[in-house]
Each structure stands twice: as structure tokens, then as C-alpha cells.
Image (cartoon, rainbow, N blue to C red):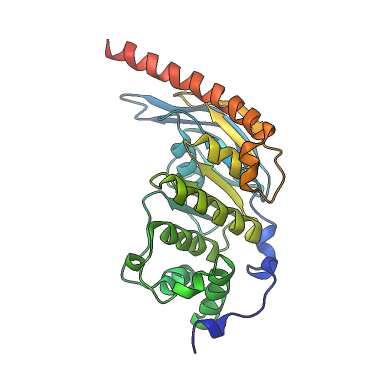
Amino acid sequence: MSVSALVTPLAHSAVLGPESHAAGSLSIRGVCKTYDPDGACIEALRNCSVEVKSGEFVAIVGPSGCGKSTLLNMIAGFDTVSSGEIDLDGRVLASADRPPLPGPNRVVVFQNGALFPWKTVLENVIYGPLRQKVLSRAQAEKKAVELLHHCGGLDAVAGSYPAQLSSGMQRRVEIVRALMNEPSVLLLDEPFRAMDTVSKTTMHQHLLDMYRLCRKTIIFITHDLEEAIYLADTVIVMTTRPGMVKQVITVALPRPRVLKMLYSQEYMRLKREAAEGVHEEARKAFERGEREQA
């Protein structure tokens, strides 16, 4: 049977299961992270508290070294929590007395990519459900092709290998692969950092389409204030190390987001507000670095 034959007429909201919309509420309370507490004692995060509603798109910005990726890794279960607690849907996900525990309810897309080069697009996308034995191959292939189809017509390259795709298309496939696992939270760690402006703009639209399709809770780490405001419902500005929440900016731009919003007065106001906070912290980091080197 051809790949196209697996595509059935389907409403966007039905691509993933009915439970995919219900989960993803994150509560981060008083989280601290100290590396090498008995030696160098590097304090990465201090008393970090954030509340994320189910289905909310949250972007985290701040100067380099402010703990953005550290926080994401703790949510993902890749790193320990020194103190404080992270809850997901009312259940403790991470705390000082719990070892890190990754799980399929949290999926990370990194900036460097992680597709299996020896597998086709379709084989990459169905890998998770088959490995977890939650779907048969036939079920996984049908679901994968439907999701690829609704995410910008990627079913057309289902039989291709990653090396045959552009970097932007590879990144889209990675996000589809993450969504195939129906995670409660999708964690994106600067996924578009290495792209040029045109490619990044295209990827923004694809991500917004996927978000509208699946409505997952998204935590998006970035240095790019423009993409943070354009994509997110909430922008969290972090202080320089040790990272704390400096300000929480609510982005009231209506959805669906369109490019002409980038020229609106409200967008420019939000950008100035975020830029002032980030630049102040970046200056502190620079001055501290100079003092430490002196």
C-alpha cells in the first residue's frame, strides 16, 4: 500500500488522541540547582517558580548561562533538582529526593537534531510508539502518515532519508516524531538557532500550525526575543546566574499569529519590554565577568 493511501480525511483535532488536549499543567515551585555543591558550588538556578497552564506556549529568554536549558533538562528528567519541586498534572515530577526520570510524557527537541540517519522519515516517526509497544506497526504507520500529512504535507517525503531533506524539513520531522508519542509537554531547546532568517520565519509558521493542530503545552528556550513574542502566550525573562524569574510577560496577540503582527504597536511594545529586561541582565553578566577576570 502506498503512503498516500494511508491518509484519510481527518479533522485537525482528531490527528492525536482525545486525551492529548487534557494534560500538560506544570508547576515549578522554588526550584534551585547547584552544581558541585561540595567543590566549585556553581549556583545555576535560585528559587525559580513558574506556573504553566495545560496547552500554554511558554518561551523562556535570558542571557547566556542564566539556567534556561538547566530548567528544561530538569523538566525533561535529564538533571537533578537541588531543592524545590516540579509537578506535572498534580503529580511530583522532580524534587531533591527523587532521581531524574525521563518519560514519554515529556519529549525534547534539541537544536542539533537527533533523527536516525539510517531510517526513513516514516521509520523515524514511528520509532517511539513501536519501541514502547503502544501501537502495532500498522497503527503507527497510519497515525504517522496522517500527522505528517496535516503538518505541512510531510507525507510526501515519508520514504526519504534525513540526508535528503533540508535542515528545516528535518526539524519539522523531529517535531512530528515528538508529537507521535503524544507527550503532555513538548520541550524545544533553541530548535531554530542555526537557521537563517528566511528559514526561521518559515519554521515559525510550521510550528504555529503544529501547535494549532495538537495544542500541546510547549516550553520553548530561545535567545531570540522576536520569535519568543511571536510564538508564545507567555514570555519568561530570566536573570543572570543564578537564574531567577525576573519578569513574566503576557502576550495578548490573537491567534492564529500572522506575520503582519510583527509590525503592530502591541508587538513592538512587548519587544521593548522584553528587551529592556534581557539587556539589563546581560549587562550585569558582562560586568560580573569583567570583575571575575580582574
Which quadrant would the C terminus be assigned to in this image? top left
The quarter of the displayed image where residue 15 is located: bottom right
Q: Would you place residue 205 above or below residue 4 in this image? A: above
Tell me the residue at 63%/67% (across/down): 16
Tell me the residue at 46%/24% (across/down): 242
Q: Would you place residue 274 above or below residue 210 in this image? A: above
Point out residue 30 in the picture as x, y percentages from the top left corner: 58, 30
Q: Which residue lies most toward the left here? A: 294
Q: Would you place residue 280 above or below residue 148 in this image? A: above
Tell me the residue at 52%/83% (across/down): 138
Point out residue 231 in the picture as x, y percentages from the top left corner: 59, 45
Point out residue 49 in the picture as x, y percentages from the top left corner: 60, 32
Point out residue 144 in the picture as x, y percentages from the top left corner: 53, 73
Name the one closer to the observer, 54 or 172. 172
254 relative to 194 in the view: left or right: right
Q: Which residue lies most toward the bottom here? A: 1
Name the one closer to the observer, 269 or 100. 269
Name the one closer to the observer, 233 or 132. 233
Residue 100 seen in the current view: no
29 relative to 128 in the view: left or right: right
Residue 83 seen in the current view: yes
Q: How many marks?
A: 0
